Amino acid sequence: MKKIKKYKHILLGFCFVLLFFGSFFIAKRENKNRIPVGTVSKIQAQTDTEITGYQDVNHISSDPSDTKDESEQKKQKSNKKKKGNGKADSSQTAKPEKNPSNIQIKTKKDQTDPEYFVTTIIDKEIVTDETYAFSITHLQAALTVKETNVYVNDNWVLYQGSVFLTKKTNHIVVEVAYETKEQQTIWIRHAYTVYLELEDIVISCDLEDKKTYTTPYLQFSAKAELAGVQLPLQVYSNDVKLEGQEEKYETTLEAGENLIVLRCKKGNKTCEKRYHITYTIPEKKETKEKAALQIETNLKEETVYRSKLTVHAKAMQGNTEIPLTLTNNSKIVEAESTNCYIITLTEGENTVVLSAKSGEQEITKTYKILYKVLTGTGEEKSNDDAPTLYCSLKDGDSVKNKKLNFYVNGKDKNGHWLDSSHFTIHCQGKDGKLIYANTDQISYQITLTEGYNIILIALTDEEGNQAKKAYSIQYKPDENGIVGTATISVEATTIGCGNLIPPTKVDIIEDKPMSYMLCELLEKNGFSYESSGTATSNFYLARITKTENFLHPRIPSDLEEKLMAVDENYPGDFYNDSLGEFDFSTGSGWMYQVNGVYPNYSFSDCFLQDGDVVRIRFTLYYGCDIGGGMVQDNADNGEQKSNWSKEW
């Protein structure tokens, strides 16, 4: 019995030793696969910049022995100071998974380390549109993109090419998970700050203040915006006004300091930017030989879409300027000002030649400039079964009001009307605004930018057959905000009272709908009015009134005969000092026509162009008596109202 107890103690001791070494070995293996406490903070301290101003979405849980809670870590992280030189903040950290051994933590130790992705976000950019579009480009082809997350102001958002900005200062974080060939996961993130300005005018320009140039020819881009809408911009170089083309400007600098001034005004809002640009003439080494003859110019061989081209050019021999000859298609072009020429291009290829001669030296430079007139591509159909597409736009039109209204319609191969869901409208990459849709009149509005605008229209039927059309519309803004004149009349011919206001020319104010012009015209002619909606939304003209009896109705007999056949309430009541809806008949009221077409939207959605003719007409039966019956659909049973045989 004593012998058994002795072996029992030895056996227990041996098991204890095995258990001790086994636990040590297992712990060591686990530690090889575990991210140590504080790894994330150490890695971020090594990176060239840090992320601040947003929630740490890449937090990795620390060791259980770490007593510091997560909220305290976030607080410490948000209090870190920013590093860097104005570039986008970026951080590359690991994101936890179920198997930590499968994660790589990437740090950017120096400029030679690889970039994993870039975006088109401009850090610290000021924008005027709440919808902010950007793209992500992946640079490492050997890696597979597993996941992409975008955060705006600490909130995860569904990224589909753009995000919605919600604050004046917006923090955008883009993080991407990559998988290597070894099935390791790498998390990379970049952070940016974008400022949203909706109340003030914002001028954007790629000039840099107090910069020095060694060439006299300066090209730059500039534009002004307010709440996402582009405004006319005035640009001056040393008090000389510059004319831009498609937001591009050119000037010739004077030796020494030059002042470039950008100004924009809209109502009581103004914005001005100034750039001090220095032009330094490079010192040329003196040689015993005579200096070579050279031509300095901004010309280059290119394709342009405008008929006039501004050319800066001069010939130099050392520090001495030599007379220069410029020809365009063999015709000599005289300088408009010092070293500045304006050439008029012809459609197709143009040959511009610069030449100079000094003693025995002679120099000639030749440039080929291709001038293309932007036009629509006509109609393209995917096949013979493609639908039929109609659009009221005219290719090649030139307009002065940036807001342009038009309508479309379409039928499939069987002659059935296609509704608005079958249309896509794009102008310069932005979707057209759907105003209202009838069966045969689907109305859109687009906002143009200065210069040529390409409007793309596509119609796709239920079977996927498609028809496309493209239109080129040129927008030329007016600095004074008056984009032209329209002719407006107010007519009551259906009740035999002729023109209540004869055709009158009125100024068209940019960005102001027709409702403003109508109200002003009525008041100037002694009328007050009753309406619903507002001048900027759903404006409907219900009634016009005068302080005197101005109506002496004499309804034509043939029109009266039709009214008695369709309206059991005819003849109804009316007033001698006012005219409006439900007078005489149940289908009466005011409608309006623009250039012979009745819009299916309100006065407040109507933006006129120079030369438009507007007729505001009183109807006795849903527009059928004035040629507007096909637009309206007011019958209780949904029946479309057709035009009658004539207009009264």
Image (cartoon, helix red, strand yellow):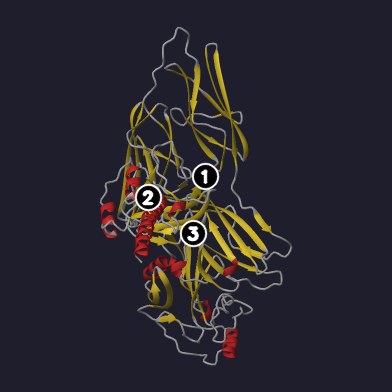
Hey, what amino acid is under mark 2?
Answer: Tyr
Mark 1 or mark 3, which is nearer to you?
Answer: 1
Find disc 1 in the rendering and name its residue. 140
Q: Is residue 78 left or right of residue 486?
A: left
Disc 3 versus disc 2: distance between alpha carbons?
Answer: 18 Å
Indicate the secondary structure of the residue bearing disc 3: loop
Q: Quadrant of the N terminus?
A: bottom left
Q: Position of residue 204 (x, y in %)?
A: 38, 46
State the separation of the CA atoms marked 2 and 1: 21 Å
Report whether 450 appears left or right of 566: left
Query: Residue at point 55% right, 89% down?
Result: 567
- Mark 3 vs 2: CB contact within 8 A: no
- Residue designated by label 2: 192
**SS type, badge 1:** loop
How busy is the neighbourhood of tag 1: few (under 14 within 10 Å), some, or many (20 plus)?
Answer: few
Callout 1 amino acid: Gln
**Mark 2: few, some, or many residues within 10 Å (few <14, many ≥20)?**
many
Q: Residue furthest top?
A: 288
Q: Can you tell which quarter of the image residue 365 is in?
A: top right
Disc with the residue nearer the chain's start (3 vs 2):
3
Task: Say which mark, if any, is on residue 160.
Answer: 3
Q: Position of residue 402 (x, y in %)?
A: 46, 56
Decide which of 44, 228 is in the foreground and name it: 44
Q: Position of residue 455 (x, y in %)?
A: 56, 56
Mark 1 or 3 closer to N-term?
A: 1
The answer to which of 470 and 558 lies nearer the viewer is: 470
